[in-house]
Amino acid sequence: MFTPHGLSQSWGKACKEVGIKARLHDLRHTFAFTQIAKDVNPYILQGLMGHSNFKTTERYLKYDKNMFVDLISNDEKLITSNETFLS
């Protein structure tokens, strides 16, 4: 069974081994970011992320338009293009 500290340490070790700099918390941002890109309703996202207060979710709603372009232009097509995010 993982403890939060143990999981964080394992994540840090794995990132170091593959040569990337990322925090475990960055996965939450990635999840929120991809859901926003898929046009998931922000209040649905609040529930998916387990936030009791919408103000917490709002922090995740800020995005960089170039990040969306990079993500949808990726060869693996991690998300589907949505014109509302690119206009």
Image: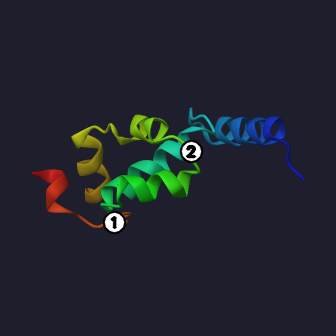
Instruction: Residue type at mark 2: give it.
Output: Ser
Residue 22's quadrant in the figure? top right
- The residue under label 1 is 77
Real-space CA distance between mark 1 and mark 2, rounded to the nearest whole angstrom: 32 Å
Residue 40: x %, y % from top left = 35, 61
Residue 23's quadrant in the figure? top right
Q: Is residue 30 left or right of residue 81?
A: right
Residue situated furthest left in the rendering? 87
Residue situated furthest right in the rendering? 1
* Neighbour tally class for label 2: few under 14, some 14-19, many 20 plus, Cα within 10 Å: few
Instruction: Residue type at mark 1: give it.
Output: Lys
Secondary structure at badge 2 equals loop
Q: In the rendered image of this protein, does residue 46 appear above or below residue 78? A: above
Secondary structure at badge 1 equals loop
Residue 63: x %, y % from top left = 31, 39
Of residue 75 and residue 45, the one placed in the foreground of this image is: 45
Q: In the rendered image of this protein, does residue 30 appear above or below residue 81? A: above
Residue 49: x %, y % from top left = 55, 51
Q: Residue at x 15, y 52 (%)?
A: 86
Mark in front: 1 vs 2 = 2
Q: Residue at x 48, y 51 (%)?
A: 46
Residue 57: x %, y % from top left = 45, 42
- The residue under label 2 is 52
Marked residue nearer the N-terminal end (1 or 2): 2
Q: Is residue 74 visible?
A: no
Q: Is residue 11 visible?
A: yes
Q: Residue at x 37, y 52 (%)?
A: 42
